[in-house]
Image: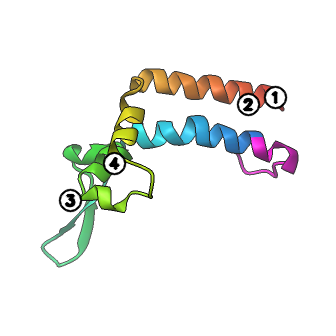
Amino acid sequence: MGYSHIPQKYATVINRFYTEALNPYLNFHRPCYFAVDEMDAKGKIRKTYPHDQIMTPWERFKSIPHYAQYLKPGITTQILEHQATAMSDNDAASKVQKARKRLFQSF
């Protein structure tokens, strides 16, 4: 949102933007680099970002063994998988851009 103060009267609409548009996009559609620690010849640990470790947070979460045990009560893998496949990555990005535009126009 920026680095300046946001008046409290906008907090509800900004929170709605995050929960309905931005957070689902970030968790299910936007790829991230995940680091792998490697030790060099001198014993120093260096972080590398191999291409096979680029994935969405949802894909990374699914790579954890028995990941379903870490879900909140009432949340199932089927619900999350449906949310991830409900729209394409480009459609989700368009949804975020439209929601952001509506949000800023409301100010």
Structural crowding at the residue carrying mark 3, measured as other residues with C-alpha within 10 Å and reported as few (<14), some (14–19) or many (≥20):
few
Marks 1 and 2 close (CB-CB < 8 Å) = yes
Q: Amino acid at mark 3?
A: Pro
Q: CA distance from mark 4 to mark 1?
A: 34 Å
Q: Is residue 31 above or below residue 44?
A: above
Q: CA distance from mark 2 to mark 4?
A: 29 Å
Tell me which numbered mark, 3 or 4, is placed earlier along the sequence. Answer: 4
Q: CA distance from mark 2 to mark 3?
A: 39 Å
| Magenta-span inclusion, residue 6 | yes
* Percent x, y of residue 103: 73, 31
Specify the label residue 65 is tagged with.
3
Disc 4 target residue: 33
Q: CA distance from mark 1 to mark 2?
A: 5 Å
Disc 2 target residue: 103
Which image quarter is the N terminus in? top right
Disc 1 target residue: 106
Marks 4 and 1 close (CB-CB < 8 Å) = no
Tell me which numbered mark, 1 or 3, is placed earlier along the sequence. Answer: 3
Q: Amino acid at mark 1?
A: Ser
- What span is in magenta? 1-12
Tell me which numbered mark, 4 or 1, is placed earlier along the sequence. Answer: 4
In front of the other: label 1 or label 3?
Answer: 3
Q: Amino acid at mark 2?
A: Leu
What residue is at 60 percent from the left and 42 percent from the top? 19
| Magenta-span inclusion, residue 24 | no
Between residue 69 and residue 23, name the one nearer to us. 69
Residue 8 as seen in the image, left or right of residue 41: right
Q: CA distance from mark 3 to mark 4?
A: 20 Å
* Percent x, y of residue 12: 77, 44
